Image: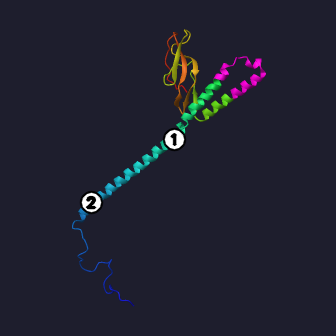
Amino acid sequence: MASDSTAGNPPAEMPAEGSDPNLDIPAKPEGDLQQLQAEKAELQDKLLRALAEAQNVRRRAQQDVERERKFGIERFAKDVLSVADNLGRALSALPPDAQAIDPALGNVIVGVQATERELLSVLERHGITRIESLGRPFNPEFHQAMMEVEDPTVPVGTIVQELVPGYLIAGRLLRAAMVAVSKGGPALRAPSNENEA
């Protein structure tokens, strides 16, 4: 059996009876306790700040994702609006009795009308809605006045013609409606503060 150099001596982890010069006994336990409590308070403060910052980062990231989900298709939507505009122009350029003149042309008109309805339905499903402008008071937040029309029968500042429709995306302006506004009529009684959507 190999000889153990520590045989007869107590284990190193257990202090020997009597005082050990290597054992550091604090002179002021109250001072150390206060120092430890101050360090603890400081670490708790740092932890709370780190948790709050992590929560803020998570909240901002969630807001960014939500904003991107709502408005990420904005450029694409603006491009698609030109297609909707062209379909509308094609239909408005046809004479009202075109279906009666040529039945084959009537079928084409019905197809273009169905395509326009479907396109507007798809836009609406994705949060893109048309601004209703005709007969409403001019609102510079939603409308762009292209011209004034002399009409004494309509109150001043009322939209009498919509040249290009306006659209909202998730309640935010995507494109202002280009409109003709009346002038020369009676003054508006009370401007409406209702949402134009």
**Seen in the image, is 160 located left or right of residue 102?**
left
Residue linked to disc 2: 35
Q: In this rendering, is residue 71 above or below 51? A: above
Q: In this rendering, is residue 197 above or below 67? A: above
The amino acid marked with disc number 1 is: Glu
Q: Where is residue 158 in the image (x, y as percent from the top left)?
A: 53, 16
Tell me how many marks there are: 2
**Counting other residues with Cα less than 10 Å from the Cα at mark 1, is it few (<14), some (14-19), or many (20 or more)?**
few
Q: In this rendering, is residue 36 above or below 156? A: below
Q: Which residue is drawn at 55% across and 19% down?
A: 179
Given the current orientation, which residue lies at the most extreme bottom position?
A: 1
Compare residues 193 and 128 and report the one nearer the observer.
128
Instruction: Look at the image and name its color scheme.
Output: rainbow
Q: Where is residue 131 in the image (x, y as percent from the top left)?
A: 56, 26
Res 165 quadrant in image: top right
- 113 inside magenta stretch: yes
Compare residues 83 and 194 and report the one nearer the observer.
83
**Counting other residues with Cα less than 10 Å from the Cα at mark 2, is it few (<14), some (14-19), or many (20 or more)?**
few
Q: Can residue 134 be seen in this view?
A: no
Given the current orientation, which residue lies at the most extreme right position?
A: 103
Magenta segment boundaries in residue numbering:
89-114
Q: Nearer the viewer, mark 1 or mark 2?
A: 1
Q: Which residue is drawn at 42% across and 46% down?
A: 56
Q: What's the CA distance linking mark 1 and mark 2?
A: 46 Å
Q: Residue at x 61, y 25 (%)?
A: 85
Res 74 quadrant in image: top right
Residue linked to disc 1: 66
* Mark 2: secondary structure: helix
Decide whether the magenta segment is chiefly helix, strand or loop. helix
- 25 inside magenta stretch: no
Q: Which of marks 1 and 2 is nearer the N terminus?
A: 2
